[in-house]
Amino acid sequence: MDPPPAHPPSLSDPQLLWATVALIATLLLGALVFAWLDRWRKRPERDILTPTDQLTAFRASYDRGEISQEEYERIRAKLAPKVRAQVNLPPLPAKTPEPTAGEAPTPNLDEHPAE
């Protein structure tokens, strides 16, 4: 068994001071790493495209000739409700069916009769 030290360690002992500084620096570095990871975890996703971004990208593809007009129109028809919802616009009203042969067209009350 080792004999007890002749004098107890004092606060001005360089070995104790360096150990304390190293412990405090390690704890601060750990806190900084946790803070950085928390901010990184809560950052907004930049990889997710909004419907408007998707439509813009498809329009650029159409302008470059990579997709046909038919393909672009089909994509636009699928994305249009999502774009309208994104900008808080009401959905488009449903189209009224065209009258078939033999049926009288419904009168349009918005138009004034020709004079």
Image: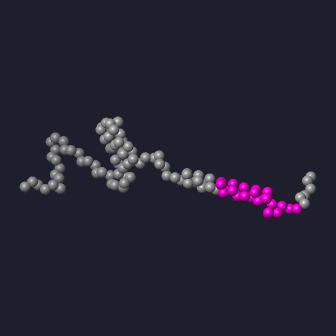
Left or right of residue 33, residue 48 in this image? left
Looking at this view, is 2 or 98 the one in front?
A: 2
Residue at left offset 15%, top offset 55%: 111
Q: Is residue 38 magenta?
A: no
Residue at left offset 86%, top offset 62%: 8
Q: Is residue 20 magenta?
A: yes
Q: How is the image coloured?
A: one colour
How many discs appear? 0
On the image, the x and y values in percent for residue 63 come to 32, 40
Figure quadrant of residue 114 = bottom left
Left or right of residue 63, residue 42 in this image? right
Q: Single out the residue that lies furthest toward the bottom.
A: 11
Left or right of residue 108, residue 90 in this image? right
Residue at left offset 37%, top offset 54%: 87
On the image, the x and y values in percent for residue 60 come to 35, 42
Figure quadrant of residue 77 = top left
Quarter of the image containing the C terminus? bottom left
| Range drawn in magenta | 7-30
Looking at the magenta stretch, what is its main secondary structure?
A: helix
On the image, the x and y values in percent for residue 97 come to 23, 45
On the image, the x and y values in percent for residue 30 come to 65, 54
Looking at this view, is 28 or 38 the one in front?
A: 28
Left or right of residue 9, residue 20 in this image? left
Q: Single out the residue that lies furthest toward the left.
A: 115
